Amino acid sequence: MRKKLLCMLLASTMLCAAGTTVYAAEQPAAQAQAEVTDASGDEADAAVAEEAEILETEEDLDGASSTTAGQGTIDLSSISMSANTANPGDAITITCKTANTARLHFYYIYHTKDGVEKKFQTHTGTWDAKNGNTSTYDSSTGVWTIKMTIPSDATAETWKLYAIQMLDTQTEAKYSYVKDASVKTSWPTADLSKWNITVGNGGGRQVPFYSIKDNGGTWNGNTYVLNGKTVTDAFFFDGSYTYYLQADGTPMADRLTYHPDGIHIIYLDVYGHEVFTNFQYSESVGYTCYFDSNGYLYKDQITFMNDHPYYLNANGKMEDGGWFQFANGQDYGCANWDGTLVNNGWGYDPYGRVVFYQWNGMVARGLISDGVYYYNMDETDGHYLGQFPVQ
């Protein structure tokens, strides 16, 4: 039965289980899911949560209890953030362009210092300005400017942006979503991880950055001298590589360490070169990590290289040992020895059961379709349960 099923499916069109989108599209009314059941402007938002920035339950966002889907769209390529790092109490400004949108919300997940998971919601209007969260809309340009303040009780971690919601009007619950690709949903999805926020513990500091091209001075490969003084406790770019110069002026080398900001983790190789946009094996932890264009360690993120997905787990380790569970505690994947994730459609799990590996390496769960059949995949671990034709 399984062989017959796989042969039939591999000959059919690819499944539309997940994808990347720039604009949120209208969804059929029968599939609409809601955050707001009694939306009457910003006063309705106030009723959703006791505190302005917090949604108390998942049902506020995902409960199926509203009217028709909306026409609102967001241009993801227009999203800009003043910073992707912050400490509790700091403010971050987000700007973006939308169409057919009267209210706009960004939803993040975070934890308090006592371990309680909460949801942070940006707001439209100024009613919650006392909490440092406001947004304004420029109708002439279509640009939103959103100010969000990191709560004082937030612990040091990465905040995950898991949904953006557009509402058509101030008074009607007609809305559309773009949700993160890691979320199982019928709404359009995209990789929202580039707008995640890394929150520190408030103990970081800023250090200067020097470039021999811009600042001058001399560099002998071991120390940087500027205006007759050896530069210390600073980052330095020699025209090819970036170094962190220690208290004695020499480059830190072969070290996985915290950035001076106290938030990010960086890596300096055996030559003292900071690693950017690349994988790097670290002897100190015994596994391969990935560092982004800022040199910051990826944690709980999927990244692509040469069109292949890789997953860096909650500790920053590249998964490379077969079947594993993602840090969200819900999804599963399978990693090859070189770290590439299995993402080529139908296959098997370690127990010999049929599963479907999506484009991002996650095993599909729930109901999926190729336009000809619906396939029922187990909600827990994604193994195949049965199928029926599309009517």
Image (cartoon, rainbow, N blue to C red):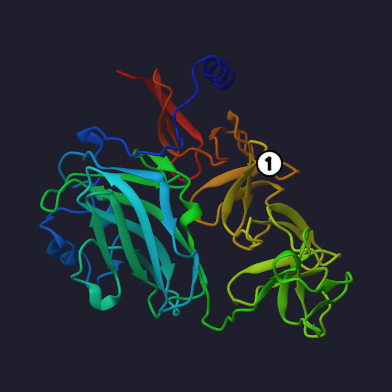
Q: Name the residue at 12% across, 48% down.
A: 172
In the rendered image, residue 212, in percent from the top left (x then y), is placed at 76, 67
Give the total number of marks visible in the rendering.
1
Q: Residue 260, located in which quarter of the rendered image?
A: bottom right
Looking at the image, can residue 240 be seen?
yes
Residue 296 location in percent, x, y? 63, 63
Position of the N terminus by quadrant: top right
Say whether residue 121 is visible.
Answer: no
Query: Residue drawn 24% across and 74% down?
Result: 129
Counting from the top left corner in percent of width and height, residue 256 is at 74, 69
Looking at the image, which residue is at 46% across and 59% down?
Answer: 160
Q: Is 181 above or below relative to 250?
A: above
User: Callout 1: helix, strand or loop?
Assistant: loop
Q: Is residue 118 left or right of residue 305?
A: left
Q: Nearer the viewer, residue 327 or 175?
A: 175
Locate residue 277, reporting x and y percent. Answer: 68, 52
Indicate whether 375 appears above or below 313. above
Relative to residue 22, is residue 171 drawn left or right?
left
> What amino acid is found at the position of numbered circle 1 in the picture?
Thr
In the picture, residue 376 is in which quadrant? top left
Residue at label 1? 340
Displayed quadrant of residue 136: bottom left
Q: Quick check: 133 left or right of 19? A: left
- Residue closer to the observer: 360 or 255: 255
Q: State whether residue 103 is above or below residue 190.
A: below
- Residue count near mark 1 (Cα–Cα under 10 Å), binned few <14, some 14–19, many ≥20: many
